[in-house]
Image (spheres, rainbow, N blue to C red):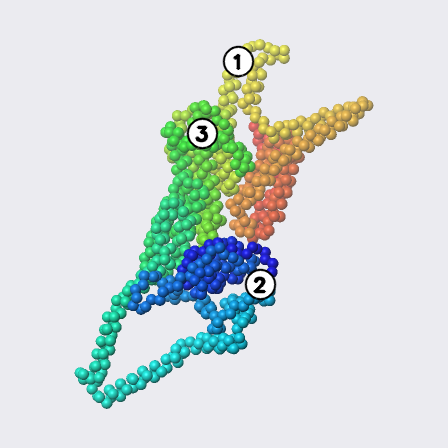
Amino acid sequence: MSHSRPPPLVTGISPKEGPAWTKVTIRGENLGTGPADLIGLSICGHNCLLTAEWMSASKIVCRVGPAKDDKGEIIVTTKSGSLGTSTVSFKLLRPERIGILDQSAVWVDEMNYYDMRTDRNKGLSPLSLRPSNPLGIDLDKGKVSQSDVELIFPGMSGDFTSENFSATWYLIENHSESSFEQLKVGVSNLKKQATKKNEGSLAYVKGGLSTFFEAQDALSAIHQRLESDGTEKVEGSMTQRLENILNRASNTADTLFQEVLGRKDKADSTRNALNVLQRFKFLFNLPLNIERNIQKGDYDVVINDYEKAKSLFGNTEVPVFKKVYGEVETRITALRSLLLDKLLQTPSTLHDQKRYIRYLSDLHAPGDPAWQCIVAQHKWILQLMQSCRDQFISGHRAALDVEGDSRPSAIGRLGHTASLKRGGSLRTPRPSTWRSETPLQVQFVDKLSDVVIGQLPNFWKLWISYVNGSLFSETGEKSGQVEKSKKNARQRQNDFKKMIEELTSQLVKLVRGALLPATLSQAGLSLYGGWEKQTELSGAWITQIIHTVRSCYEALSALEIPNDLLQGIQDLLLDLRVNCLVVTLLHSAEDIKRLAEKENWMVDNEGITALMLLYIDDALMNSLCVVQEQRLLIVLSNCCYLEKHTFLNLMDHFEKHGLTGTEKIARVVDAVRELDRKLFDAYIERRADPIAGSLEPGMYAGYFDWRDCQTPTGVRSYLKEALVNIIAVHAEVFTVSKELVPRVLTKIVESVADEMCRLMQCVSSFSRNGALQVPHTHTHTHTHRIETKVQDGLKETKHWWI
């Protein structure tokens, strides 16, 4: 036979000696690939396969049987490695026989123990108590080799306890030279054993039948003698004498065996107590282990031990177990309070919050710890924002810089959402004089933005985890806590929405109090004002603040917070821009008024003085700020003008006068048209892609679902925002060139309409309200002309828009 693995090798056994039925641990190499691979195990020549428990390829646990040999090897046989060898041996101890009156200090290994939880006696399997010689005749080991027998009987076994037992194999192996008469005796012995097994307790009655007859005769004789005597109650009668004899016999027996039986009862109770302590030491040691693991912070170990103890002893009626389990519950209650305090402690990381929530969930803490954490975080963020303002007002702002200037700041943040998602650097290098040169209001807005961006994203993520049930472990999922959490989240959506509105409102009011106090009420000024002593900011500093607030808004938008919750920040940005424009114009007017002081009264060749150039330079420096998209429009307009008014006219004059070279002009016109096309595509990409890209996040903001939505009451906010953005593009194009408006707006609207069509095609199904909302909301995406009038300073201009 070919084998795929090396033969088993036993290198160790623990303990190395002991009486029969001692539990031993066998260690070695190649002890099988699994329980099914283990087909043989003998210790001192006794088959121990029935009690064997395969643990791994290097460990087997079993009990030593009543072998004939006092010392022998440990042989393991596997299917994959065949018969193994051993480098160690086991010594079987023979217990001395102890009389009923002899004292013994040897603890007997109780095979049948009393289970206090189930009131059942457990013992070894009857198969393990079968005789080693079932035929009852002398064993005669033949000379047939083991390998030859395996070839003759493949897949079979000569072990009568095996499932693949072969009687022929057993006879060849143990009785190959036994005579036919001996085998007949063996068959008779087998029949007797089967008969005894079937008769059971009746066999004991048959064996002592004569004793029962003698007792019956004695009782009958006593009854007849009593009837003839008639003096059952007379003193000195046979009944009285018999009673006295029985009492004396009882007293003598009690005197003789009282000490022995007392020692036996005491020993039995001690063994029973030790057995209980040994078997249930997990429960008795659990209170101390819980305290130790809590001190080490191993809360997972505590939870696992508690779940195990609860499943085993939660409903026990044994007084001692109930008492110990009560101590466990007391310590678990204290642990729940400790974890809840840690959960509500601020500041804390999102990871720690989720971890403590999971611990409390697994410990079945009362209430809703996740919601308690959300409420506590909301209060703490509000307090942190207000404390930021109070410390700047009082001049103790250094207390806020816990980590110094190395902490990320809002000033210098990248303006794009993609940069925020990539986790790019949010701080530009600051000079050493930054704090002394920067106005206090700018530092305050910078620090306030740090607080919001540092805390509000984790606050929002904690709510999202609470909504989708990801705060709980597998135990929580099985116990139904995930569904309970989702149900509670649905009921508390309005409450959380109010929390977000309160946080954004607090941010807006604090910034308004520092920069736009005129927009607050008198009560608001008392809470958020107090900046009267600070100097007025210039347009450059206000622009920096706008960038800071804008970065904060983009960071919150990247979290997919619904736009209606961030509307207050958008309104703040608009008011800050207006204020920045007013301040810039006022400063420009003051600068222009002071230009007269710079007049030198010197006339140049064109008949003008340097005052005009100074005016133009200052005006341009203070009022013109052309962005890249506007430059694209200006160059695009110039290209259109060159093509229509310069090159085409030039070609007409060349042809009119019969001049050559029109081909070169045509090539130049083609180059200008190619440049025009590239500029047009670049501008459309910069303006149309952001509008089209904002449709899908806005459509599904707040976990909107077309299959489960409310009755539509009007156009949704994301579409209004898209229309406003298109109008902004129209205004930008119209400011540069009115002729480019139809061309640009047509392409913009087509891109937005195509994206909207694609999004609608991606929706698998609509509810009734969803089906109503689709035409109600998106009929506005069709391109149509609406004539409007826009008053622009001193004139009215008619133009076309969507």
Between the residue at mark 1 and the residue at mark 2, the CA separation in whole angstroms equals 119 Å
Find residue 739 and report its horizontal and vertical position in percent: 66, 31
Check disc 2 and give the amino acid type: Ser
Q: Which mark is residue 45?
A: none
Query: Which image quarter: residue 438?
Result: top left
Q: Residues within 10 Å of mark 3 (few under 14, many from 20)?
A: few
Find residue 283 and report its horizontal and vertical position in percent: 36, 56
Which-is-in-front pick, marks 1 and 3?
Answer: 3
Callout 3 secondary element = helix
Q: Is residue 484 above or below residue 119?
A: above
Asked if residue 39 shows in the view, the reply is: yes
Asked if residue 370 shows in the view, the reply is: no
Q: Residue at x 51, y 53 (%)?
A: 29
Residue matched to label 1: 598
Q: Nearer the viewer, residue 766 or 788?
A: 766
Residue matched to label 3: 405
Query: Which image quarter: residue 14?
Result: bottom left
Residue matched to label 2: 147
Find residue 150 and report its horizontal and vertical position in percent: 58, 64
Where does the N terminus fall, quadrant-wise? Answer: bottom right
| 783 sits to left or right of 403 | right
Find residue 437 and report its horizontal and vertical position in percent: 45, 23
